[in-house]
Image (cartoon, helix red, strand yellow):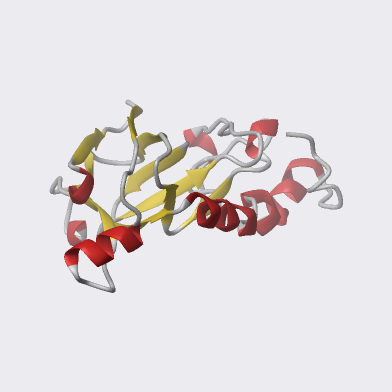
Amino acid sequence: IVEVVGKQFNWMVRYPGADNRLGKVKTSLIDGTNELGMDLTDKASMDDFIVNEIHIPKGKPVLFKIRSRDVTHSFYIPYFRAQMHAVPGMPTKFWLVPTKSTADMANEVGKPDFKYELVCNQICGRGHFAMRAVIVVDEEDDYLAWVAKQKSFVESNPDLLTKLNGSTTDIKAIPA
C-alpha cells in the first residue's frame, strides 16, 4: 500500500508500517509538520512512514491510494500507462503489478540513469511542472531492505507525541 497525496506543487508519499495499515487522517490536523494530517491518536498511524521517493516491489501487487489536498491533480506514471485523478475530498485508488525493475528498464532502454517518474499532467497552477516524484521498482529483497531502513513519522517527529500525551519515552513501545 502506498498513499500519494498531491498538493501544489509536490507529491507526498506515505507507507504503512509493519501492521500494513495506514492510520487515519484528518484535514483539521494538517500543519507545517504534519502535512498529511495524520491522526496520532490512531494506533495504526504509529508505524506509518513518509518518504520522498516511491519504492515498490517488482512482481507484487501495489495498491496506490490517491488524495489531493487542494486542487485536482493527475497521478500519471507514463511508463506504466497508468493515470488517476487526485480530486480534493474524493480519495481514489488503483492496483498495479510492476513487471520490470528500474534496473531492467535501464538495460532495456540503454540508459543507465533511467528513472520511472510520477508526474502531474493536470494543469494545477504555476508550479505544475515541478510536480514530479521518482519511482523505484526494486527486486523484492532490495525493497524489503529499503522498508527496513525507514523511520516512522512519529520517530522522526517525537515532538508531535509530546503535544499529544506529554511524553516521548515510549514511542517504540506503542502497540500498532
> Is residue 27 or residue 114 the one in the foreground?
114
Instruction: Return the x and y of residue 108 as percentages of the image width and height.
Output: 21, 62
Point 59% across, 57% down: residue: 145
Point 22% across, 72% down: residue: 111
Name the image quarter holding the C terminus.
top right
Number of residue marks: 0
Instruction: Return the x and y of residue 91 as percentages of the image width and height.
Output: 35, 28
Point 31% across, 44% down: residue: 99
Q: Is residue 52 above or below residue 4?
A: below
Image quadrant where residue 128 sits: bottom left
Image quadrant where residue 133 sits: bottom left
Relative placement, left or right, of 124 versus 93 is left
Point 68% across, 41% down: residue: 46
Instruction: Return the x and y of residue 61 as percentages of the image width and height.
Output: 41, 34
> Is residue 22 or residue 36 the one in the foreground?
22
Instruction: Return the x and y of residue 98 as percentages of the image width and height.
Output: 33, 43
